[in-house]
Image (tube, coloured by chain):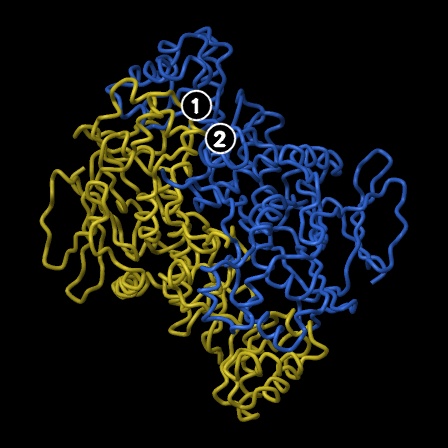
Chain colours: A yellow, B blue
Amino acid sequence: MTGSPSSAGVSTALLTDRYELTMLAAAFADGTAQRECVFEVFARRLPDGRRYGVVAGTGRLIESITRFRFGEQELDLLSDVVDRATLDRLADYRFSGDIDGYPEGELYFPGSPILTVCGTFADTVILETLVLSILNHDSAVASAAARMVTAAAGRPIIEMGSRRTHEAAAVAAARAAYLAGFASTSNLEAQRRHGIPTAGTAAHAWVLLHDDELSAFRSQVAALGTKTTLLVDTYDIRRGIELAVEAAGTELGAVRIDSGDLGVLARQAREQLDKLGATNTRIVVSGDLDEYAIAALRAEPVDSYGVGTSVVTGSGAPTAGMVYKLVEVDGRPVAKRSASKESRGGRKGVLRRYKPTGTATEEVVFPARNPIPVGEHDRLMQVPLIRGGEPVPDLPTLEESREHLKRALVTVPWEGLKLSRGEPAIPTVFEGF
Amino acid sequence: MTGSPSSAGVSTALLTDRYELTMLAAAFADGTAQRECVFEVFARRLPDGRRYGVVAGTGRLIESITRFRFGEQELDLLSDVVDRATLDRLADYRFSGDIDGYPEGELYFPGSPILTVCGTFADTVILETLVLSILNHDSAVASAAARMVTAAAGRPIIEMGSRRTHEAAAVAAARAAYLAGFASTSNLEAQRRHGIPTAGTAAHAWVLLHDDELSAFRSQVAALGTKTTLLVDTYDIRRGIELAVEAAGTELGAVRIDSGDLGVLARQAREQLDKLGATNTRIVVSGDLDEYAIAALRAEPVDSYGVGTSVVTGSGAPTAGMVYKLVEVDGRPVAKRSASKESRGGRKGVLRRYKPTGTATEEVVFPARNPIPVGEHDRLMQVPLIRGGEPVPDLPTLEESREHLKRALVTVPWEGLKLSRGEPAIPTVFEGF
């Protein structure tokens, strides 16, 4: 029996930059390892022209932190990197601090303190790489995916980009796209690991494998039922649709078109299907779709979209640009001061202001030590995620985070949901710094 | 003892699109599963303006195919996807066909048949997703990284982009960057899994953790020795360099500058270090570097580069756009014919032509059944990788593939190594189709 790709018990500790460990060794040596630190995760800006970002990966992160342990294999490798005393401490390492953050599926804006990690320097510094890898990847995908879902205006989208990204990133991308409102994924491991519904049609190879298109379609219908989706653009689309209905009858589930001018082809296909009596047969389109192409097809008789490359690569922004910055040491605010990358020291609080109608108006970031009044329509953004190293009870499920995002998007001012480039949908205001 | 992130024995079979499995089930049902198929991997085009691509991931792919097995957990999941008879066959599945391809580290051009997978339809179709995920990701990173190495003109580059990409993709990205000539990586798991040298400096958090910059530097030197790299741009760079030399003496290994106008700052730093007598102290620069920024620093006294985001995201091209196409069934050439995405049917052979001086002149793709004469300066590009499901003996190591690329880059016509946008460095010619 082979093992499974399940991640249960597998250490995440080496998914880490070497310098976190060498800093740790030096901090053990000089005693600063025990100083109480606050690190914050935020994005200095949104990708060019984007109006909002979507926090994603939080659930994966919390689970990954519980597996951040140094076993024998990890310590073996590190014996060349740090001294014996540090190795001994690492053997006992488990994160024992607190983490607060935006709920997964929440919107964020430039400067939003998305995650706040508190604990000793030893506890907190070595989580940097893992925290950023997960949040930067998953948020980049979810942020792009949410725009596609808006553009699709209620029509389902299948995520089918696994082949365009690293094989493990594909699983996380499927999860992030589902969080953002995609209906399903092609990725089987995403179903196994995250319970995401899988879907699929057939490839051109399926048609080419057979002696002719009709036998390919007949065979697919025989094996998978008339509700299957037949890929009709291998040779001639008009002929393909004719044969598809011949093979499956007028109760055929769907046809897929994967190339050409999808708008024109969808219109022709709808007309032809209706004439053939296949009025309930749906039309799935795919092929280099991004949020703009999806929006451009809004007036066409398209029933669902298959999206690959653009969603798994964040549609031009493959990483969310979040950083992990030390802002407080033993209660003292700290911040880098030179050059262009300035940061504000001190732990932050954050609330979002809303109109009585529920529309968000601004993100207010303030020093946590000087809390500001929370008005009737304001909402504090951070929630507890980890306490004393343990995930808090009743963390939201992926489905709940998906609902959270759906509700959050309703609060965005209407111009913030446009695909056109512009400023963040709401401004981030820093009060009291 | 916790488990390790080692991939040994972990199944890769579910890192697969659902439709590969449903097509397989239908092919078992109609008997076509046993037809002999040839699938080819190629890229229709290079990323916009690029002159060449670098094949990367082959080694990871071969290893992953040996783990493509359906164990109990995989079959459990699939019980909702395919019928009982298919599950039974999957339980015994192991790839038993042949794979030929470009050696890892070889250059490729539009249409180059990078990988050729032969076997029954059952054997070959379900590898599509895994093959493309690995090659598309790793080749995208290596192709960008090779341009950075050329731009660096012999100065070492550290890959430090783990935090900007999925945590597992980061490990593969470190490998691809090393293949392309990067000197080292920050990623510890890449060292453990692939033997890549790791390197690192310190973060701004290290300085901020301490009461002042001098104690941070003194402590780092005490723990890590004078050959360490001190990060000098937390407060004021000039003062930082002064304190760095005060803490470590003139034998300080290096200073790192991570922000600001790196060219100007490097010149000032060199002058200051020399005046302080630290003439051997190197200057490391980092901060949003890509191949263009690296090239722009060529005239400056920079000793090494740290590159993050741009290399792990393929510098604007995060996926290589390779496809996996069925080209032959039971000896009969097949190809999609409709619309824009036409393909040439039939298994291909490929050779590269060179001038007597060793400069490559063209990539010649021909029908494998009509071999063309191989001239004195021509080279057949594909090598055997898997035979009867088993990796061939003596596959190149990562180090050997790294050398292979180094030699291959020497054969590129000089204008093909320029960073400016242009046509592929050599044309791909299709002969005999």
Could you tell me if residue A412 is visible in this image? no
- Secondary element at tag 1: strand
* Residue B292, quarter of the rendered image: top right
Chain letter of mark 2 equals: B
Q: Residue at x 46, y 45 (%)?
A: B168
The residue wearing badge 1 is: B256
A70 relative to B18 in the view: left or right: left
Quarter that holds the C terminus of chain A: top left
On screen, A226 above or below B62? Answer: below
Rendered location of residue A157, percent (x, y)? 44, 69
On screen, A167 above or below A348? Answer: below
Q: Is residue A242 or residue B232 the one in the foreground?
A: A242
Residue B306: image tag: 2
On screen, A18 above or below B66? Answer: above
Chain letter of mark 1 equals: B
B345 relative to A348 in the view: left or right: right
Residues under numbered marks 1 and 2 in contact, where contact means CB atoms less than 8 Å apart: yes
Q: Is residue A162 or residue A95 the one in the foreground?
A: A95
The number of callouts visible is 2
Disc 2 residue type (three-letter): Gly
- Tag 1: Cα neighbours inside 10 Å, few (<14), some, or many (≥20)? many
Disc 1 residue type (three-letter): Arg
